[in-house]
Image: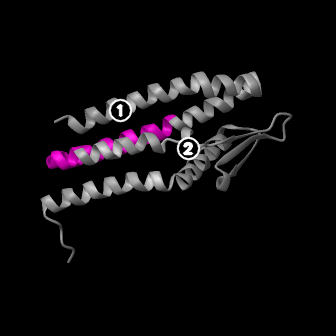
Amino acid sequence: MLAVPRPGRLHRVVVAALLGGSAALVLAHTAYRAAEITLAGALLGLISEDGVEVAAHRQTVYFGLGTDAPLGLRMTPECTSAFLVVPLLVVGAVMVALRPRITRSVLLALAVAGGAVVLVNQARVLLMVGLVRLLGVADGYYWGHTLLGSLVSVFGGAAALVAFTWLATRR
């Protein structure tokens, strides 16, 4: 028979798991970036008629293969969603530690907000690819990475934070 931990112990386990997850994302960010760029490559492969290749060990997706303008995008530590997910995990752990009765709400909020942050980052990568194809490498990358990509990240991250707060604290 599986023993169910007492509620007080369960909350401590959840807090430890959330904090451990945040530490793991920081320490294993290379593997996380590889997974993230692999997802971007899969999404790009679904919508692209050009060749797409993922070099996960380099955290790079190559697109436009077979065209006159192939390009590779590398997922750097600054561009990953991991460092937006980590604060959510830490805040979630603190919330569960301070108010154990909201554990379920916090876990749901983390799932929704964490998923949203990942999807927003994927949208940012796909936006860059689209702008590179539309405007060319120099202008497309500049606009996609510097301006529009940053706007997508800021607004998407803000929406994820609002969703997290609302879901975690509503009754």
- Between 153 and 78, which is closer to the camera in this rendering? 78
Left or right of 16? Residue 38 is right
**In this rendering, is residue 46 above or below 151?**
below
Give the image quarter of residue 64: top right
| Helix, strand or loop for the magenta stretch, by majority | helix
Neighbourhood count class around disc 2 (C-alpha, 10 Å): few under 14, some 14–19, many 20 upward: some
**In this rendering, is residue 170 above or below 40?**
above
Give the image quarter of residue 48: top right
**On the rendered image, what quadrant is the C terminus found in?**
top left
Q: Secondary structure at mark 1?
A: helix
**Which residue is located at x 24 percent, y 60 percent?**
13
**Residue 125 belongs to the span the image colors magenta:** no
Where is residue 83 shown, x and y percent of the image? Answer: 46, 42
**In this rendering, is residue 57 above or below 90?**
below
Left or right of 26? Residue 109 is left
Residue range (magenta): 95-120
Q: Give the amino acid at mark 2.
A: Pro
Where is residue 34 shown, x and y percent of the image? Answer: 59, 52
Q: Which mark is residue 121?
A: none
Where is residue 27 shown, x and y percent of the image? Answer: 47, 55
Q: Give the amino acid at mark 1.
A: Leu
Neighbourhood count class around disc 1 (C-alpha, 10 Å): few under 14, some 14–19, many 20 upward: many
Q: Which mark is residue 161?
A: 1
**Residue 114 belongs to the span the image colors magenta:** yes
- Between 47 and 54, which is closer to the camera in this rendering? 54
**On the rendered image, what quadrant is the N terminus found in?**
bottom left
Q: Secondary structure at mark 2?
A: helix
Q: Which mark is residue 77?
A: 2
Q: Earlier in the sequence, mark 2 or mark 1?
A: 2
Where is residue 135 shown, x and y percent of the image? Answer: 74, 22
The reply to whether the C-beta atoms of the residues labelled 2 and 1 are less than 8 Å apart is: no
In space, the residues marked 2 and 1 are separated at their CA atoms by 21 Å
